[in-house]
């Protein structure tokens, strides 16, 4: 069949819509959009402004997002042992489920798990009603409440109207109480974020400085979060998930977990194999290296993701890709030359109009490249543009999309010193990630020589080893979880799991999905032929059709299934050539999930 292209304006595009902003309009805005924090999808919002559509509230990178979090006060809900749903955020319902703080000691007090649901339009008695699906976006430390508030409609369009779309905040996170605070203010959080950003090889003292920062954070967290942190472990949250399932009047969990959420899903399946209904783990982490705090197998496919962007640049040509060379290796050499210059000669900027300022150095650029690999179909083109700008001496565009910019914002915020808690919800920061991940594992007692050897070995696997800081972070952690998961072993679950892995995932290699599948009898690995972290990094009718069939009917894809994608790194179009029967609704929903990517970066 002839090539068909879905116009690159998902907000206004539908099969019945003949008048999206023209491709010329979008192309004309692409260069400016590539310099914006949202990357090429920012062009969509610009195009919508031209068409008068962008006056609608709640948009992110051209994709509609959920309601203002200040619209609802969670403290008006009294926690209860059953689910007493209250109308919230216009189209949603909220509740707080009371669970034991420590399941082994009911007298230790209670926790209140925050849940939000986008209810099925079908009644509970309707034969088409299929119950709740729980979501976890990863992290650890990601908020399921936030994800569902922002993306419920897309999940509904993919999965069908028979399900309640349910998000919950794990222990210590978001609206769940008691909240976890491992820093006193937003400014202090910014300082720790900034101190963790240098890469290991950026200077002679970088590794030692990172190690020292980890020790300081460990001491501070022990003081501030010592009462809460022992009760936020993955096994405890798995027990909460069973409590949530039981409170719905059901015995079998339905769940879609991403990244760290795959650890949570696999842990649940191992602990409660008879309570597994439909469980999708997407972007699969190697549980053995996670629970030992090794984090040593995550980067097996990272370099392939980078060269995927470079090859896309070659294929796009010099009129589209600003760092074009004849081969991917030549582009890599060009970027490496730029990085080598930044080691000794960082570039500063000051914007007289906005007052923005900053310094761009080797670590900043290395980490921007690394984090781009999480969502290359959203931000790969932007990366090539800001690198070209930097070659020309313009450092501001790459600074504006960096984690250094985020840290600077925290530190210079006018409201860095309000009374604790400093925000309505606990922020997803490195402190919360470490509170969960490090507490799940035995103490890391590595000294500096041992850590140096660790990174030398990691460098044999990936050029991005120097960005991979979790084990350093855990080297200063002193709080251990009250309940820890002890083993991963072969388990027969009441329904087989569906595992999903991308061929060039930067932090959860396909190898890990295949390894973890061996621990769960009759489970199946679905391969998505793409870069990016988790299936939602790209748009694939094949992948999301398989997920829909699994949740609706319990059917698994054939073993060895490899799904192609409809996304491209250069250009805003979704190509559907080769699809005999394009499912427009599913493609649109998948595209919007891709553009409103939500899995936290590490």
Image: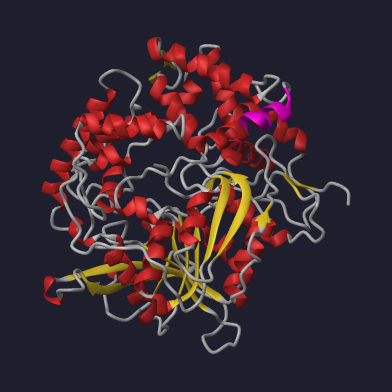
The residue closer to the viewer here, 307 or 128, is 307
Residue 514: x, y in percent? 52, 56
Left or right: 409 in relation to 342: left
In the image, residue 314 lies in the stretch drawn in magenta: yes
Residue 288: x, y in percent? 36, 54
In percent of the image, x 48 and y 63: which residue is there? 518
Scheme by which the image is coloured = secondary structure
Left or right: 531 in relation to 277: right
Quarter-wise, where is residue 27 in the image? top right
Residue 597: x, y in percent? 52, 48
Decide if residue 10 is in sight here: yes
The residue closer to the viewer here, 348 or 14, is 348
The residue closer to the viewer here, 266 or 51, is 266
The residue closer to the viewer here, 41 or 235, is 235
In percent of the image, x 65 and y 21: which residue is there? 322
Decide if residue 78 is in sight here: no
In percent of the image, x 30 and y 43: which residue is there? 430
Q: Is residue 96 above or below residue 66?
A: below
Q: Is residue 558 above or below residue 183?
A: below
Please report the bounds of the magenta region as a residue range: 309-317
Left or right: 13 in relation to 577: left
In percent of the image, x 56 and y 33: which residue is there? 306
Which secondary structure type mostly characterizes the magenta part of the structure? Answer: helix
Q: Is residue 560 above or below residue 111?
A: above
The quarter of the image holding the C terminus is: top left
């Amino acid at each position: 069949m002839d090539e068909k292209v879905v116009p690159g304006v998902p907000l206004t595009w539908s099969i019945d819509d003949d008048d999206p902003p023209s491709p010329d309009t979008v192309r004309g805005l692409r260069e400016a959009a590539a310099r914006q924090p949202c990357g090429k999808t920012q062009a969509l919002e610009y195009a919508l402004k031209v068409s008068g559509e962008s006056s609608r509230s709640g948009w992110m990178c051209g994709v509609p997002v959920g309601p203002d979090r200040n619209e609802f006060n969670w403290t008006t809900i009294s926690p209860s042992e059953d689910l007493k749903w209250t109308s919230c955020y216009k189209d949603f319902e909220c509740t707080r489920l009371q669970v034991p703080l420590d399941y082994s000691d009911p007298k230790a007090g209670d926790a209140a798990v925050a849940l939000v649901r986008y209810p099925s339009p079908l009644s509970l008695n309707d034969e088409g009603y299929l119950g709740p699906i729980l979501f976890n976006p990863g992290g650890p430390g990601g908020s399921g409440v936030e994800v569902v508030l922002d993306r419920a409609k897309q999940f509904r369009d993919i999965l069908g109207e028979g399900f309640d779309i349910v998000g919950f905040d794990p222990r210590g996170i978001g609206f769940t109480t008691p909240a976890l605070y491992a820093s006193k203010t937003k400014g202090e959080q910014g300082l720790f974020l900034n101190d963790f950003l240098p890469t290991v090889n950026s200077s002679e003292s970088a590794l030692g400085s990172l190690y020292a920062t980890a020790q300081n954070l460990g001491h501070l967290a022990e003081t501030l979060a010592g009462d809460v942190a022992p009760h936020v472990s993955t096994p405890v949250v798995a027990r909460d998930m069973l409590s949530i399932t039981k409170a719905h009047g059901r015995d079998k969990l339905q769940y879609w977990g991403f990244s760290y959420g795959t650890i949570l899903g696999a842990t649940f399946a191992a602990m409660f194999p008879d309570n597994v209904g439909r469980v999708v783990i997407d972007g699969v982490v190697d549980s053995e290296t996670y629970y030992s705090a090794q984090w040593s197998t995550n980067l097996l496919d990272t370099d392939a993701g980078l060269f995927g962007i470079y090859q896309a640049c070659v294929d796009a040509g010099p009129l589209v890709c600003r760092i074009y060379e004849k081969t991917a290796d030549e582009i890599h050499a060009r970027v490496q030359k730029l990085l080598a210059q930044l080691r000794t000669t960082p570039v500063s900027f000051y914007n007289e109009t906005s007052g923005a300022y900053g310094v761009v150095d080797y670590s900043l650029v290395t980490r921007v490249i690394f984090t781009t690999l999480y969502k290359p179909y959203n931000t790969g083109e932007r990366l090539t543009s800001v690198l070209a700008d930097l070659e020309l001496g313009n450092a501001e565009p790459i600074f504006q999309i960096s984690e250094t910019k985020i840290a600077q914002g925290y530190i210079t915020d006018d409201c860095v010193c309000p009374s604790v808690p400093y925000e309505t919800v606990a922020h997803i920061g490195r402190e919360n990630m470490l509170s969960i991940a490090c507490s799940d594992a035995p103490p890391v007692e590595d000294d500096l020589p041992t850590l140096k050897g660790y990174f030398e070995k990691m460098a044999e696997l990936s050029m991005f080893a120097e960005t991979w800081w979790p084990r350093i972070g855990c080297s200063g952690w002193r709080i251990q979880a009250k309940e820890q998961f002890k083993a991963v072993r072969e388990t027969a679950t009441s329904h087989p799991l569906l595992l999903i892995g991308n061929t060039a995932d930067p932090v959860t290699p396909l190898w890990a999905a295949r390894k973890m599948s061996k621990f769960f009898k009759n489970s199946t690995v679905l391969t998505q032929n793409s870069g990016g972290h988790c299936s939602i990094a790209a748009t694939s009718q094949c992948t999301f059709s398989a997920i829909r069939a699994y949740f609706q009917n319990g059917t698994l894809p054939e073993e060895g299934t490899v799904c192609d994608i409809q996304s491209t790194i250069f250009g805003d179009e979704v190509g559907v050539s080769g699809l005999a029967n394009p499912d427009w609704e599913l493609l649109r929903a998948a595209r919007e999930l891709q553009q409103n990517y939500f899995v936290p970066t590490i």
